[in-house]
Amino acid sequence: MLEGVNVALGVSGSIAAVKCVELAHELRRHGASVRAVMTSAARGIVHPWALEFATEHDVVTELTGRVEHVELCGREGWADVLLLAPATANTVGKVASAVDDTPVTTCATTALGADVPVVCAPAMHEPMYDHPGVRSALDQLTEWGVEFVDPRIEEGKAKIATEAAIVTGVARAVSNRPLDGRHVVVTAGATAEPLDPVRVLTNRSSGRMGRALARACHVRGADVTLVHGTGGTKPDVDAHYADVEWVGSSAEMLAATLDACDDAAALASAAAISDFTVDASPEKIRSGDARTLDLLPAPKLIDTVRDEYPDLPVVGFKTETSGDDEAMTAEARRIMDRSGLAFVVANDASVMGEAETRALLVTGETSEPFVGSKLAAGERIADELVGVLR
């Protein structure tokens, strides 16, 4: 997601600075190179050696005759993006007023003057975050093009966003955003058909693939609606990159998807939607006796969407148990032709619920194999979708 990206990490004196070591590691896990800059207040919370270890670079703690702020964030500087994380009320106010009395604020002034992207992850107590002066400073920075990774409001605090959310914000800031202004709908996860008030008929889908694709579309500039099935239990996920609609049954997913597609540029149907439904018992089915369930075919989501929105580009996903690439490709092309799909992602059922995938990206002419993480697969699929929408 951040392969080859140089990130200057500006750390100021919030207690959330204790998280900056793990944040630096997370940025690097996604391919970034990181160099840290610290205020004196931040050094009172985290020792520069910790960030030196995490980044494998010297840490800037003061500005010298080497003009480190220009070397990092100037027009010909090292950094592709300046990340202020955590950004205190003090730092936000100073950056908005071009007050340069710390290495971090001086790097920010330099970056803004040099048109280097700036991403800000605020962290402070909630009353400080709600102060009109701080709000005014945030508005000013937004007007100047600074991008924000909003804090989590919990326990009277505006806590710094998760590492995953910050990585996503940095990736979006350095993207050329080919999907800017486009609304993309992605379905993810498993639906669950009630058998009675206690039991459901569902499957093993975790929703990882759909969430990875939604995140990749967001990074590329899209406004994303994620229609996510809860399966047996609603998953605890940080879907910071999308407006999430949680649904239970296949009928609920179909209704939510049709509604979301009203102004969409594309739909990617990655969810594992129940092919069958049942007439649910109003009371718990008693155990002990053999039971026969009449499975009724559920409406096909992509076919229903195609009927409602005949010109909408739709990406299909097809899960098979054969493990045979030729058979998977043939089945993918069958549904592509049947429903007029832009392309289809075919995968083996063995990857359901796993972090890694083995998939085939099937178009009218080619069948491209992919083996790797679902996060990387989401990026590849998003790039293919960019080509379709262009």
Image (spheres, rainbow, N blue to C red):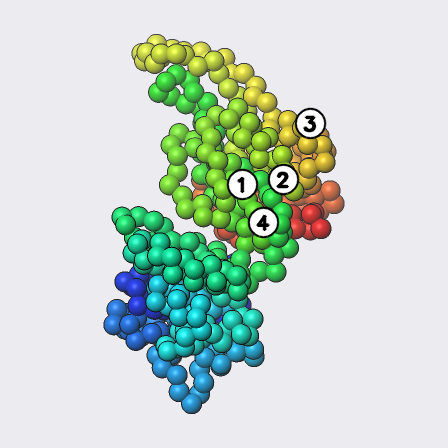
Distance, label 3 to label 2, CA atoms, is: 15 Å
Q: Which mark is residue 222?
A: 4
**Image check: 106 left or right of 315?**
left
Q: In the drawing, what numbered circle is on residue 264?
A: 2
- Mark 1–mark 3 Cα distance, whole angstroms, equals 20 Å
| Element under disc 1 | strand
* Label 4: how many Cα within 10 Å (few below 14, some 14–19, many 20+): many
The x and y percentages for residue 142 are: 50, 60
Residue at point 32% right, 11% down?
A: 286
Residue labelled with disc 3: 307
Q: Which of pointers 3 and 2 indicates the residue nearer the eye?
A: 2
Using a 10 Å C-alpha cutoff, classify the residue at mark 1 as few (fewer than 14 neighbours), some (14 to 19) or many (20 or more): many
Mark 2 in CB contact with mark 1 (< 8 angstroms): yes
Other residues around mark 2 within 10 Å, as few (<14) / some (14–19) / many (≥20): some
Report the amino acid beneath label 1.
Answer: Thr
What residue does disc 1 label? 225
Left or right: residue 265 compared with residue 319? right
Sequence-earlier tag: 3 or 4: 4
